[in-house]
Amino acid sequence: MSKYYYLIAGLPELALEDNKLYCSIADFKREYYPFLSKQDRQLLDLFYLQFDNANVLKLLKDRDAAIDTRGLYSKNELLEEISLMKGGAEVNECGLPSYLAVFLSNYFKDSFDTSVLWDDRLAGLYYAYALKCKNRFMTDWFDFNLTVNNVLVALTARKYKMDVASQIVGDTSVCEALRTSNARDFGLSASIDYWEQLVKAGETDELVEREKRIDQLRWNWLEEHSVFQYFTIERIIVFFQQLSIIERWMPLDKDRGNQMFRSIIAALKDEVQIPEEFR
């Protein structure tokens, strides 16, 4: 396991209330990747792939769409792979990660369950791929976020009397409970120690306040699960995730948050995916 004594010693302390960015997520790759081992860069690549996921969905709808340049792949690279898979190429011939290749193959063969939205299908494949990672801290983090996202979606869907099962992403035991349980707490409050925090967040109608509570929960998880990680890649992962949380808050304000909340509820009622930036 690689140790990053000098690199981590030079990292600044971050706080959720910070209103200035030490560096952006894009800057992080340029500034820190050269100092990381290939194996550790691949771990962090899992986070950047979320932008590629969004870019693929955009380009499938409009090949001229502007993409998020924080992804690992350029627009031309993505378009080439999309064209390749559209032409009937096998999954192992695709130059993208296996889950994206499977998604594109199924997309053009239309072999998915039609009751599940394309965004959710891709999200499910992405989480399944990430949860196979051999780094325990990473898999725990992805599992935690999958649980948080799904519980909040389930609580919102139930609150507005919409179908819960069709909104759930993934195949974990928590996912199954959310899809099938009629219990008030989906039978999960005893096994999820932050259940009450999620319920309180889910009851908050103002999106900005709701997201602050959720990000505080994420921030606390990162701090609590890295107490004994001093100079390892896990400490750099924590810094990266906290940086991404701060970056996400930079353009948000109360008015925009309330507008987004109204659009989320309308989207759920129309069975459209919740915007990616709030998942």
Image (spheres, rainbow, N blue to C red):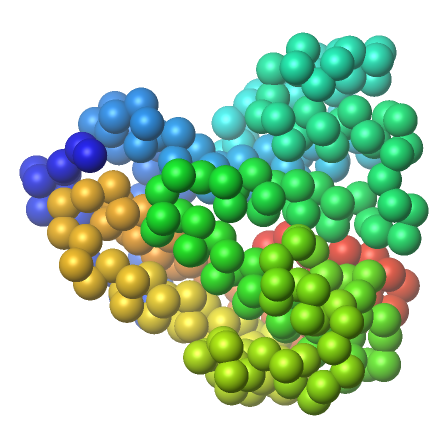
Residue 2 vs 207, above or below: the answer is: above
- Number of callouts: 0
Q: Position of residue 127 (x, y in %)?
A: 58, 46
Q: Is residue 266 left or right of residue 32?
A: right
Q: Position of residue 267 (x, y in %)?
A: 82, 63
Which residue appears at 70% of the width and 88% of the height? 184
Residue 81 vs 43, above or below: the answer is: above
Which residue appears at 66% of the width and 30% of the height? 100
Q: Position of residue 27 (x, y in %)?
A: 35, 36
Position of the C terminus by quadrant: bottom right
Which residue appears at 90% of the width and 33% of the height? 110
| Residue 243 visible at all | no
Position of the N terminus by quadrant: top left
Which residue appears at 72% of the width and 86% of the height? 183
Q: Is residue 156 left or right of residue 46?
A: right
Residue 222, located in which quarter of the rendered image?
A: bottom left
Residue 7 vs 274, above or below: the answer is: above
Q: Position of residue 45 (x, y in %)?
A: 44, 33
Residue 63, located in which quarter of the rendered image?
A: top right
Residue 168, located in which quarter of the rendered image?
A: bottom right
Residue 208 vs 106, above or below: the answer is: below
| Residue 69 visible at all | yes
